[in-house]
Image (cartoon, coloured by chain):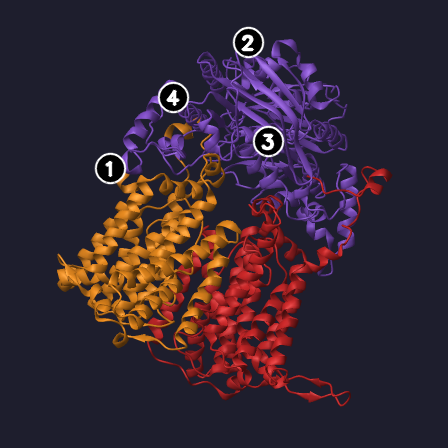
Amino acid sequence: MNAPVPHEQVAQDRYAVLDAAPRTVRDTLLRWEVILVILLVLTVVVNTLVSPYFLDVYNLADATFNFSEKAIIALAMALLILVRDIDLSVAAIVALAAMTIGYAAEAGFGPAGLFATGIGVGLLCGVFNGVLVTFARLPAIVVTIGTMSLFRGLTQVILGDGAKTQYPPEFLELGQSYFIKLRELGFGGLVIPPVPLSFLVFLVLAALFGIVLHKTAIGRRLFAIGSNPVAARFSGIPVDRLRFVLFVLSGALSGLAAALLTARLGSLRSNIGIGWELDIVTMVILGGVSIAGGVGSILGVFLAVLVLGLVTFGMSLNNIPGQVVSVYIGALLIAVIAIPRLVEKLRGGVVR
Amino acid sequence: MPEPILTLSDVSKSFPGVRALHDVSLALHPGRVTALIGENGAGKSTIVKILTGIYKPDAGAIRVAGEERSFSSPRDAWAAGIAAIHQETVMFDELTVAENIFMGHMPTSGARLVDWGVMRARAAELLKRIDAEIPPEFKLKRLSVAQKHLVEIARALSHEARVVIMDEPTAALSANEIDDLFRIVAALKAEGRAVVFISHKFDEIFRIADDFVCLRDGEKVGEGPIASVSEPQLVRMMVGRPVEQVFPKRDVPIGEVVLSVQGLSNATEYADVSFDLHRGEILGLYGLVGAGRTEAMQGLFGISPPTRGAVRLEGRPLSVRSPADAIAAGIAYVPEDRQDQGAILSLGIRENVTLADLARHVQGLFLSHASEAADTRKLGRRLSVKASHWEQRLGELSGGNQQKVVIAKWLATKPKVIILDEPTKGIDVGSKAAVHDFIGELAGEGLAVVLITSELPEVMGLADRVLVMKEGRVVDEFSRGAWSAEGIVAAATGARRQAA
Amino acid sequence: MSAVFRSREAALALILALGIIAISAYQPVFARWGNISDLLTETSVLFMMALAQMVVILTRGIDLSVAANLALSGFVAALVSQYYPETPLIFMILAGVITGLALGFFNGALIAFLNIPPIVVTLGTLAVFRGLIIILAGGGQVNASEMGATFQAFPKQVFLGLTTPVWIAIGVSVLFWLFLNMTRTGRGFYAVGGNPIAARYCGISQSRQELLAYAVAGAVAGLCGYFWVARYGVAYSEIANGYELTVIAACVIGGVSIAGGVGTVAGTLLGALFLGVVMTALPVLQISPFWQMAISGAVILAAVIINARAEARPGKLILPEARRTGRRAA
């Protein structure tokens, strides 16, 4: 099924091949990222109209506290889903890593040691997942449902119904204050906004992931794996090794998120971060990463994180309880994916 | 001639951007086998899907025994007495033979519950009718490919079909199994059923068919009794122009040994595969489907590393544990299964072409789009890939052009040895000739080529030497000029055992 | 003999029996009828939910929203009981079942007709269903004192030594067995999951099978919602939080293949029973209940590893000597 070729071109030379597709406005507008930008603008406009407190740098900075840790994990999850895997154990890894951080703090570790502990535990959990999925060739969804129970179960066994609340103040300072302080630039009323550490980490990682995925050979290989794992392997791509690395990465970032979260909360119970895996998968899917693999962008995930974060923040400003917010988020997820398909179906296109 | 069981009159079917069938009429008569002939994409499978109720025609009429019928699902087609044996065995590995035969129309007793006893008994009866000794309660996954075919035939019979459609039924069968199949076809004929037989193999068509219908680009371009045409006439009808069935064998000086394989073996698939491959040589690897050729070459390429054997490349020992090792050493493998193993359909031409050799396009830390695009243009033009632009997704190209892109991907790795596994399978005649030409060109440039093919004219037309594999082992070797078609086929089938 | 060993159900039953014997030898109280009856009552909801989830997984799908559906349907049933206490019990239960059916149907419609991946749809509806409870309840909950007496009494009634939820679970299991093994539609789930293209050629509609699977899963979740709320005497948004994963775990342990097309009623029931035994055995063995989650995690991993070994497809049998002995690597 060849795409239609413009007539003039055919007349010139039957086999002339252009370097790139002629761009159309329609294609550009229908890009997933554009839809997300529109959603983001809508979110900001509606929230600003509804609440005078929304467009306040401190409020916005505080809002980022609530989604940055999840968003960090979402970056790794995006790559996993891109290659047709999934890691449902991330929230359980957060719990296990946070617990270990709790014990390490009691043992007198400093902030750097605590972050290293969290990342290290997460990394080991990721190795465990990765071995089972890539070397034992088990389906990722089942393995990570299993390790989700295992990791959180271990947390419960060790912690019971106790809590950890003793942390060094410098550690808590990292999690609870702004890493970049508000500064007036002195002209035009411009300011450098206050930025919490977790959001800064997310921004840096998002940029890094975006570059790796879209500009390097590794990224191209990940797209190839997600599109056709067998053909990717036949093309000399170390498919299993890359998938393994992604599971390790997902574990390590979960551990990092655990450190940031613990520093912010200053306490921990075994149910810490429960249900996060679903929030994170939602971020990724809303970001346009196809669950069937091979399609997605870090920009999309980044925008989806902001949309979800600001919707949640705006609603909390209006005292709407968290679970009602999740109704909107769940509905948003379904609507954003269902509406284009519904339109296509009504127009008579064949979906299946 | 008796009244036709089934007629299609002026049937048309279009898909977005493609006219699959245009005003096609045909008639199927009881007790006659009609061969449906045409290149890939000529509309054969669209006709099969219309006859079996999977597609609805846009225009035209289907008449069964003179009565106009409209099929909106496969059930309607069965009810009208039409059943098909599809190209690949499309069945349920995890279910029993009996269920496979009756899926979609299981016998039920009162209260609409499935009657397993009756189902098993009837399955056994149907299998017995075609002399297949397969227990109905076996799970399908325990059967061989040939046995699965028999189950498909039993399924067609279970509908008491008056019209049986066989879509390339012999593709995966051995010579003996094909003989068995033809006996069944003859029995179906004798029972007064109409058979539609689709095959690319002309010897089979002339052996079994009574009539033929030839399609090209969705239109009927010829029909009549098979006895009234010759093979060259049929080929001309299919492609719309005469095709030289002679292969342009180039004279290439054969150089020194590039690749030397000794005793390559794994546990269950191939054993003691040994050969030397020279610069500029095309080595044919002939055998029946399932003879272990693909497995041995994939072992060499590192897909499933062999358990024993030694490989030397340009005199140096080579250990290949993964495709990446093979590529680095200068071995390329163009797989047989283009859709699953070769092409990445959702990526663009450029991304496919550079995939196996991405490292060369890395400048600093990043991929260089310019470098990739330059390579793609060069290789794409060399292989005369037809596309609207170089970023076009592979899924939008024809099969032949996809294959050219896959070959381009492997040439981009600058191999010393290239293994081509059924490179012309399922592509149109035009692209086929281009690929043949190209294989000769590669050898002319000093590449060493291994050509796996099941087409005798192809291997005899292109190869300098032919190794014949049977049941996982190399059983014979022939050199250009000292071979005969009969000899090669006999070695592959073991029909006449030669002195080993 | 070897067929018995190859059957996963037999192997699982054997492991379970050995486990129960070992626990009873250590703590004879475990084998008392009262304890067994409690165990079955505790597990009855899991039996039913796992069977329904199995049907979904057979079609290559997954339903993450079942626990949220259970909570919402149970809440609706509780509301009926609170505001219309005169309603006959059967209609209160039906209110739950119909709510569940409608929610399942919604999932099924999105999956079957718009072709949206099941994990995406049910992830979304999971959040929506739970949130709807908050909206319906205005943030509150329905307590035992607000539910009718018959509403709460029914699950505690005992016939022939077993409680009503157990009898219902037995009935539901029999229905599932009949449905999956003795009807064309039931076999259709295996066909669609085993080979969707072949199923289409056999005239089986994938959309219809999928719609039905999610509707059935919804209806069962609705029924279980009633039992859950009535037994524990409270209905609010957090009920059965995360229970969808326990349900899927029971399926995996019972040998249901996440790739679709493989799974039996007996296997799934045994998988659910296994989890039920683990949960009840811990207090009997005086092991901290905090072990429960870790153990089920380990069991899921063990089960999936065993499943994979059974399903592994090693090289083809091409060499004559390999074909003769039927020997495959491992």
Where is the C terminus of chain A found, in terms of image quarters?
top right
Q: Which mark is residue B46?
A: 3
Amino acid type, callout 3: Thr
> On screen, C22 above or below B405?
below
**Can residue B484 be seen from the camera position used here?**
no
Name the chain under label 3: B
Graded by Cα atoms within 10 Å as few (under 14), some (14 to 19) or many (20 or more), the crowding at tag 1 reads few
Task: State if disc 1 and disc 4 touch (CB < 8 Å).
Answer: no
> What's the CA distance linking mark 4 and mark 1?
27 Å
In this rendering, would A164 be left or right of A15?
left
> What's the CA distance linking mark 4 and mark 3?
31 Å
Mark 4 vs mark 2: in front: 2
In this rendering, would A22 be left or right of B161?
right
Q: Quadrant of residue A77?
A: bottom right
Residue named by callout 4: B132
State the image coordinates of residue B300 (x, y, percent, origin top left): 58, 37
Amino acid type, callout 2: Met
- Chain B as rendered: colour: purple
Image point 38% across, 68% down: which residue?
C241
Q: How many marks?
A: 4
In this rendering, would C83 be left or right of B366?
left
Report the chain shown in red. A
Q: Are marks 3 and 1 on the same chain?
A: no
Residue named by callout 1: C1
State the image coordinates of residue A131 (x, y, percent, origin top left): 46, 56
Name the chain under label 2: B
> What's the CA distance linking mark 2 and mark 1?
59 Å
> On screen, C286 above or below B441?
below
Task: State if disc 3 and disc 4 touch (CB < 8 Å).
Answer: no
Residue furthest right as drawn: A12
Residue named by callout 2: B1
